[in-house]
Image (cartoon, rainbow, N blue to C red):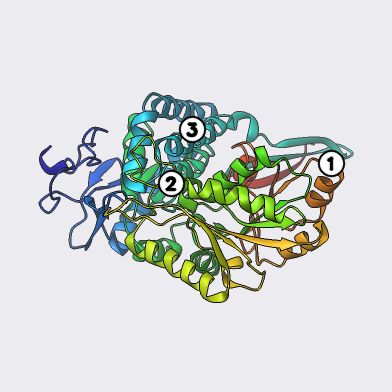
Amino acid sequence: MPGGAVPAVGAAPREDEIPIRLTGSVADADPLPNFVNGRWVHPTSVGLLDVPDPSSGSVIARVPRSGGSEVDAAVAAARSAFPAWREVPVAERAHRVLALRNLLEARAEALARCVVRENGKTLDEARGSVRRGIEATEFAASAPTTMQGAFLEDVTSGVDTTLMRQPVGVVAGITPFNFPVMIPLWMAPLALVCGNTFVLKPSERVPLSATLLARWIEEAKFPAGTFNLVHGDAGAVDALLGHPGVDAVSFVGSAPTARHVYATAALHGKRVQALAGAKNHLIVLPDADLERSVPAIVSSAFGQSGERCLAGSVVVAVEPIGDRLVERLAAEVSGLITGPAADSVTEVGPVIRAEHRERVLRWIEEGKRLGARVVAEGPVPAGASGFYVPPVLFDGVTPEMAIAQEEIFGPVLSVIRVRSLAEALDVANRSRFGNAAAIFTRDGKSAREFVHRIEAGMLGVNIGVPAPAAYFPFVGWKGSFYGDLHVTGRDSIEFYTRKKVVTTRWF
């Protein structure tokens, strides 16, 4: 279609019609549509936001700033579809999810390349994130087992008790820019298979992947209104949080926004889970195998350009390993290749936006001002117009420095030196966040002490990115999570269902 425009109302855009590769201006192209009640709808009388390619800065699409009326339409569609959808047998709902999984599997490469284009991940990183999303979809298809209740005969003489699970109702999913496929797939398939209907509000920074997902959910023949897509920014989020037709909210994003989402949604009586920020510590003991540990640390800190909540952003080196560790880290960081996400040699892609690049660069300058030493800095492409940040390694960082406490969300790694494992654990546990942590050691006793004492939910032993598989919950602690039931795993089944307990006596 000329200029990468999408079809008009009523026609679903094919995957090759989504404007993920434009060579000219999008000034005359239609903005991306919403998907509401089984129809592709272009909002009217709303503002538009440009969507740039982080690798070049060139605009590749425009997204509508949907507001209250667009959210009302999507929630009304979901509300209307809910009574019939909840009556569909769980095995049939699982079959629809399997149909979606098969479409995702067949088109995984196209989806990964879309992520590269709009998000700036390298192709390998994008492929990995798509794979994790498919795994979550596969777990959702196990609902005929995971949704099972319980039965106890003769709780008292002649009285039996049954526990059953039923859907919550209309669920809103609000997802971030850093995993535009994986995180929507953490939410939507599980919510749908449990009998809920769903409204997705993806990050306005990465709307293209969500549009593809909506197209394929439609192709998998989910009934109209069961899944709805509303593009927009904070205005659409607030409309969902306060909407009386929304029963539950699942959110992933920054710490300040997570607090706002949790407080606002809970105030309006909604079930809510809000995944927030992180400051993850990687403890390296003197006996660590540096040949294997250093690549894992570098991958944790600089993979995905540091834009992930499981990134290891603080290394806590237990002396006397500090000098040897920093020397090896510096050699690795100095050699990292930063460049366009689609280039096969790129190891560190761009960050998401120019304003985020400036934010990360300010943090680097702040670290220098506070007295931390830059011991390695990778190059960035000369004259590049994309949003590139040099990979930076700081040494001489103290726990009180802001760069050791705040989430930078960029390719920056700080090294703190301590004298013992006990001191390392104290440094890590001072953080107000508790998403993840890792230890690198060959000593089982030390690893056990770490697992027992660390105040974080997802832990790695000689693993830099301790991401749980989809059938385990994603369990952030402290300021990294607001709520009580986590995303993925059996926690997600609990979140997307309500329990009924029936006590029966027959005369």
Q: Quadrant of residue 479?
A: bottom right
Helix, strand or loop under label 1? helix
Residue marked by disc 3: 131
Q: Position of residue 38 (x, y in %)?
A: 30, 40
**Quadrant for the C terminus in the image:** top right
Q: Amino acid at mark 3?
A: Arg
Horizontal arrangement in the rendering, residue 357 relative to residue 271 (left or right): left
Q: Outermost residue, bottom direction? A: 369
Callout 1: few (<14), some (14-19), or many (20+) C-alpha neighbours within 10 Å?
Answer: few
Q: Amino acid at mark 1?
A: Gly
Q: Amino acid at mark 2?
A: Val
> Measuring 56% from the left and 51% from the top, which residue is drawn there?
330
Q: Return the mark for residue 348.
A: 2
Choose mark 3 or mark 2, whichever is in front: 2
On screen, residue 123 above or below 28: above
On screen, residue 112 above or below 40: above
